[in-house]
Structure formats: C-alpha cells, structure tokens
Amino acid sequence: MEFVSKKEINFKEPLVVVGFPGIGLVGSIASYHLLKNLKLEYLGHFEDPKIPGIMIVEEGIAYPPVRVYGRDDLLVFFSDVMIPPELVHEMSKNTVDFLENLNPKMVITLEGFASMNPENVYWVSSSKDVLKPLLSETVGALELGMLGGISGILMKKCNDKNINSACLITETIGLRPDPRGASKIIEILNNYYSINADIGELIKEAENIEEKMKNLAKEHAKMMSKPKTENPMYM
C-alpha cells in the first residue's frame, strides 16, 4: 500500500479526523460533510490492489475511493468503501507513518454502535492521559464495549508512536444511514476544536429520513390493519 500525494500543505499541528464506513455510516457521513462543508483540498489517496477497483465521480471528476483532504490545521481521511480486513493493519501503519512527522494535536476516529434508543456520544482512547481531559458532563467514557477495524488498530498504533488519539463513538440505530448521529459527532468536534462546520444540512437530511420512515411505518400499519381476504384455490 502507498499514499499517492496530489498536493503539499505546510501543516500546523493539525487535528486529524478519520471517518470510514461503519455502523450507521456515521463516520463516513461526518467526514464527508466536513470535507465538503469546510471546502477542504484534495491532498491524495491510498492505493493498493486489495482496495475495490472503483472510481467515485463527482461533478465529472473521478476520484479513488480512499482519500485524504485537508487544510493547514485539519486533515480528514475519508473512504467510499469498506476497508478490507486484510488491509486494516497495513493501512493503520501507513497512516501513522504519514502523520508522524506532522505533529498532530490529536487523531480522532469516528464510529457508531447500535442502540435501540440512540442518544449518547462517548470517548474511547488507549491512553488514560489522553482520555481524561476529553471527558465532560455531556461526553463521557464508554464503560464497556468493543472497538475493531481501523478505529481500534489505528488508535493502538498511534499510542505506540506517542501520538495522541481517541475515538468518538455515537449511539445509532444502525439499520440505515444516520446523518443525525453524524451531526452529533461534528457538533462535539466544533465544541472541542472550533472547526466551525455547519451541521444544518445534516439535521435537515436526518429530518427528511425520519419523516420518510414515519410515513413508511404508517403505510405498513394501514396494510396490517386491513382485513385479510380469502383467495380460494381450485384444482
């Protein structure tokens, strides 16, 4: 695997956000919204034969699926595809190698976990020294759970290199894309790191999805309440 650079930036202790597809797609929705809303520059992409061989077309321009965007104080890692399990360790290592000389203030991975009543957002870190200053009345520590994939391995490899890292994980229903969960994550990033991303579009999108789901539920209820008619079969 290699990182193919398309543009160089002089970074100033950037915040690094890593949001790849996962439960509720909250990580990828949040990272995509950040790069679009903040008009971040396309800096390059990861290349490997095991990454699905597709190109993503936006406004006539084709992009590889695993990309990096940024400005001098912010880096966003984004992927249109699931990272194959056999690439997780290698990609995590390459990412840490890429970040090591940039002196990032923090590396934050974004994740969701399934909940029937999604409300809370939690911090997770592999370092108590990193975790403690992040905790607040509104965002506590995840008491018990499991973290895998890029989020877990990348955090471990960052810790091995003394790079501050944590995971911001939100509860999500998990059965459909969850822009509301993504908006919660971005709101916390705004509050902690003043990145000033507007979440209005995500909230509106969430309301549209929720309204559609309500209408579908109503239609389903109507269908279920109709008396069943017999359909005799003759031989």
Image: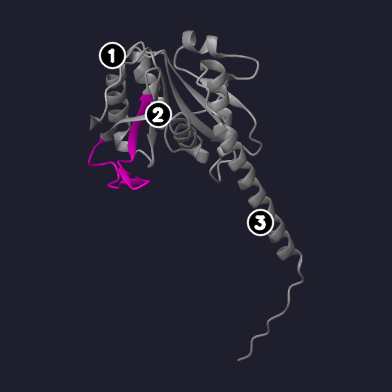
Residue in the image at 65% along x and 31% along y: 119
Q: Quadrant of residue 127?
A: top left
Can the viewer see residue 77 in this picture? yes
Please state the horizontal and vertical placement of residue 111, each as a whole percent of the image.
49, 31
Q: Secondary structure at mark 3?
A: helix
| Residue at the spot of label 1 | 101
Q: Quadrant of residue 18?
A: top left
Q: Which residues are magenta?
A: 47-70
| Residue at the spot of label 2 | 40
Residue in the image at 36% along x and 29% along y: 41
Can the viewer see residue 171 in this picture? no
Q: Secondary structure at mark 1?
A: loop
Please state the horizontal and vertical placement of residue 133, each as a whole percent of the image.
54, 9
Please state the horizontal and vertical placement of residue 212, each as a whole percent of the image.
64, 52
Assess disc 2: are there few (<14), some (14-19) or many (≥20) residues with their C-alpha within 10 Å of its C-alpha: some
Left or right? Give the position of 87 relative to 108: left
Q: Secondary structure at mark 2?
A: loop
Residue 216, labelled with which disc? 3
Quarter holding the N terminus? top left
Q: Where 219 falls versus 45 (above or below)?
A: below
